[in-house]
Image (cartoon, helix red, strand yellow):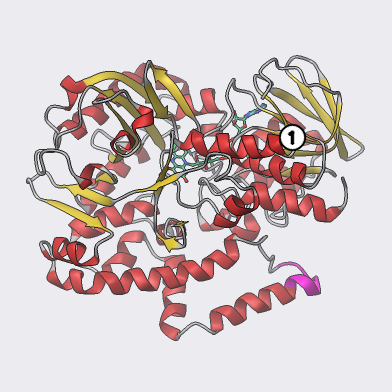
Amino acid sequence: MNGSGKASRTSYDAVVIGGGHNGLTAAAYLAKAGRDVLVLERRHVPGGAAVSEEIHPGFTFSVASYVVSLFRPHIIRELELARHGLEIIPLECSFTPQPDGRYLLRGADPHATRREIAKFSPRDADIYPEFGLAMTKLARFAKEIIDHPSPDPASRSPRELMKLLRLGRAMAARDDELRYLNVKLLTMSAVDFLSEWFESETLMAPMSVSGIIGTFLGVRSPGTAYVLLHHYMGEIDGAFRAWGFSKGGTGGLSRAIASAAESFGAEILTSAPVDRILVSGGRTAGVVLESGDEIAAKAVLSSVDPNRTFLKMVGAEHLPGEFTAQIKRYKLRGSSGKVNLALDRLPEFSCLPGDGPHLYGDIAIAPDIDYLERAYDEAKYGDFSRRPYINIVVPSTVDPSVAPPGRHVMSCFVQYAPYALKEGPEHWPEKRGAFGDAVVDTIAQYCPGLKESILYRQVLTPWDLEQQMGLTEGNIFHGELSLEQLLFLRPAAGWSRYRTPVRDLWICGSGAHPGGGIMGSPGEMAAKALLRSRRI
Ligand SMILES: Cc1cc2nc3c(=O)[nH]c(=O)nc-3n(C[C@H](O)[C@H](O)[C@H](O)COP(=O)(O)OP(=O)(O)OC[C@H]3O[C@@H](n4cnc5c(N)ncnc54)[C@H](O)[C@@H]3O)c2cc1C
């Protein structure tokens, strides 16, 4: 890794813009295939939104993303990431405290989970395993889609039509019930979908939030049921719906990919912001850094979001008008923030005091459906939620490397924090403190001693995510995972295959199929598509 901002050469087979986990993955595959690759990362540290940093002495925060599940197992094998230090620690359970002193604790033991759900609804306890099975079957089908470039129904190429036919056949081979379920998932809201199965809001509320993460929608908005499936597709060691902590924080995963890429010969340059992509005669021949240095390349891969790549680095003058119009319409609309806390002791929940497995998994502040919908109401009109949905993890309970002995890090993912404040996004810095207070106050309702235990607080609004991490409008997935911008429509109709209207410019970040989350797929599939093209 080179932090000098100066590359060792002036010309490469491929230059990758952005050293997030997807850019690094693309670089690793290209270098493994014997190509000369340079990664240019704007920040002093690679990882992008999958980064660990010692923000307070002795405390390592997973600054943005905090749990891993969607990362494709075949990438771990093909890049030998375990050899490069990747270790995933499974999350033990999902804990939902209630304001009335009750709680729901779902974990790996089906009997214990059944007893827990039965506290709220014996009927739901009976149905829960059946639901899990149906979602797992759907997720296995969806895996076919996320692990391959998306077939385009508008294409007339016989190869594309064959792919569509194969998918259609795979769907037709499912039983009727699953096919109906699939259509419902594509069209319904997370709450309506779940209500067809369950009756207890204590169960449905924490389940429904998977449908809204990273979108500017509420749990009752149509289309959110699909995103729920997106979060079921994760797997660890073949176990679907399994989430885990990357040892050392999510940056541990990025470091492992960076180490693999370097072992194959890739060069990674940090503190090297790219100013623009050189385009002439409809093709790219390299990039210009903010320092003014020019780097020539046979191919350029951008892992930064489509808005930034095309509208800022390429420029509309080099793009077809219809394509530019699609990129301008592409929805970013950041809706999430993050609060990271350094604590001098374990958090103590009044409904379940003391240490225990409930602190080793994820904790959802999502007491009921109306609570979540009200949180969305405030965001709809340009304000952050006073009582937000919060997903909490305390990784130091299972990974001692991230905090000093006896101390802890608490990571709080928060929704909603709309980028588009009614006063304008540039007013976020004035509201940052109040937003952080709302988050801490909300958790303190369940954890009365929390405020006294805070040694340090890091608050990231969507404005901060944009300024610090380069995420346009603070969107955590480089664009919402809503149906109209997924599959063959991501990031624009006709351009879901990592190629772009500029010859030799490819996209390889979360704005490409299959989308956001720590998956590695866009990076892997873009690199493989470029190698297949024989352009380098
Ligand atoms: C707060 C938050 C919480 C999240 N939680 C989770 C989670 O728990 N689990 C999960 O799976 N996903 C989560 N996500 C989503 C996930 O982290 C992202 O989708 C994923 O990490 C994006 O990876 P990427 O490589 O595509 O892009 P990025 O990580 O955004 O990488 C792009 C890189 O490009 C760099 N860059 C930008 N501009 C330039 C430039 N001009 N020149 C050079 N480099 C540039 C950036 O610095 C960055 O390093 C979360 C995201 C956020 C923000």
Q: Which residue is mark 1?
A: 266
Residue 50 in view, yes or no: no
Residue 67 in view, yes or no: yes
Q: In the figure, 490 relative to 476: above or below?
A: below
At a point 52% along the width and 71% down the height, the residue shown is: 141
Say which element carries label 1. loop
Expressed as whole percent of the image width and height from the top left, the position of residue 523 reads: 66, 46
Expressed as whole percent of the image width and height from the top left, the position of residue 439 reads: 26, 30
Left or right: residue 112 versus residue 6 is left
Which residue is more in the foreground, 145 or 88? 88
At a point 53% along the width and 23% down the height, the residue shown is: 467
Quarter of the figure with residue 35: top right
Quarter holding ligand 1: top right
Q: In the figure, 312 relative to 329: above or below?
A: above
Quadrant location, the C terminus: top right
Left or right: residue 1 versus residue 124 is right
Q: In the figure, 136 relative to 397: above or below?
A: below
Quarter of the figure with residue 276: top right
Quarter of the figure with residue 280: top right
Badge 1: few (under 14), some or many (20 or more) residues near its Cα, within 10 Å? many
- Residue furthest to the right: 281
Expressed as whole percent of the image width and height from the top left, the position of residue 351 reads: 9, 43
Expressed as whole percent of the image width and height from the top left, the position of residue 130 reads: 30, 74
- Residue furthest to the front: 83
Left or right: residue 351 versus residue 518 is left
Quadrant location, the N terminus: top right
At a point 79% along the width and 50% down the height, the residue shown is: 530
At a point 19% along the width and 32% down the height, the residue shown is: 347
Q: Amino acid at mark 1?
A: Ala
Q: In the figure, 501 relative to 444: above or below?
A: below
Whether residue 321 is in magenta: the answer is no
Stretch of the chain drawn in magenta: 154-160
